[in-house]
Image: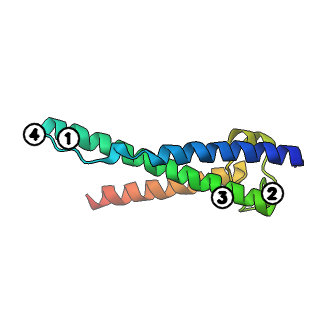
Amino acid sequence: MTKTELNKFREILKARQAELAEVLRNRDGITIEKSPDALDEVQHAAERELAIRNLDRESHMLRHVRNALQRLDEGSYGVCIHCDQEISPKRLAAVPWTALCIQCQEAADSNQQDSADAFDDELVNAA
């Protein structure tokens, strides 16, 4: 990968990092609001749960972006951390913070799905 391409990805990642850091600073959605109406309480709880999930997702994404910036600094950016093969430029353009090539990502997603299916089967069997 050329120095120009690496600099382009660094700028994209830094911009995404700044955007995510700003989003994570706003935690107004997770405040607990009391209401005399039970339905309002339920609505506030649902909104708070959604805000918490969004914050969790965004903080997870921020960790990925920071890790990608660290790999850029170390010189290992664009190389799959699992199989050490080069990650395709198309994949990096689509997901600049990725640490896995498409084959390893598909295998990881499949393993997660298999684990989720096994967990669902255990829940069904327990019932």
Observer-nearest residue: 24 or 80? 24
Q: Are marks 2 and 1 in contact (CB under 8 Å)?
A: no
Looking at the rendered image, the disc whose residue lies closer to the viewer, 2 or 1, is: 1
- Amino acid type of the residue tagged 4 in the rendering: Pro
Of the numbered discs 4 and 1, the one sitting upstream in the chain is: 4
The residue tagged 1 is 42
Provide residue 91's location: percent of width, then percent of height: 73, 42
Which residue is drawn at the image coordinates 75% and 48% (left, top)? 10
**Could you tell me which secondary element the residue under label 1 belongs to?**
helix
Mark 2 to mark 3: distance in Å? Answer: 18 Å
Q: Is residue 44 left or right of residue 115?
A: left
Mark 4 to mark 3: distance in Å? Answer: 45 Å
Asked where in the image residue 67 lies, by quadrant, the reply is bottom right
| Residue 80 can be seen, yes or no | no
Q: Is residue 62 left or right of residue 89?
A: left
Which residue is drawn at the image coordinates 37% and 43% (left, top)? 51
Looking at the rendered image, the disc whose residue lies closer to the viewer, 4 or 3, is: 4
Which residue is drawn at the image coordinates 14% and 40% (left, top)? 35
Q: Are marks 2 and 4 in contact (CB under 8 Å)?
A: no
- Amino acid type of the residue tagged 1 in the rendering: Val
- Amino acid type of the residue tagged 2 in the rendering: Gln
**Could you tell me which secondary element the residue under label 3 belongs to?**
helix
Of the numbered discs 3 and 1, the one sitting upstream in the chain is: 1
The residue tagged 4 is 36
Disc number at residue 85? 2
**Could you tell me which secondary element the residue under label 2 belongs to?**
loop
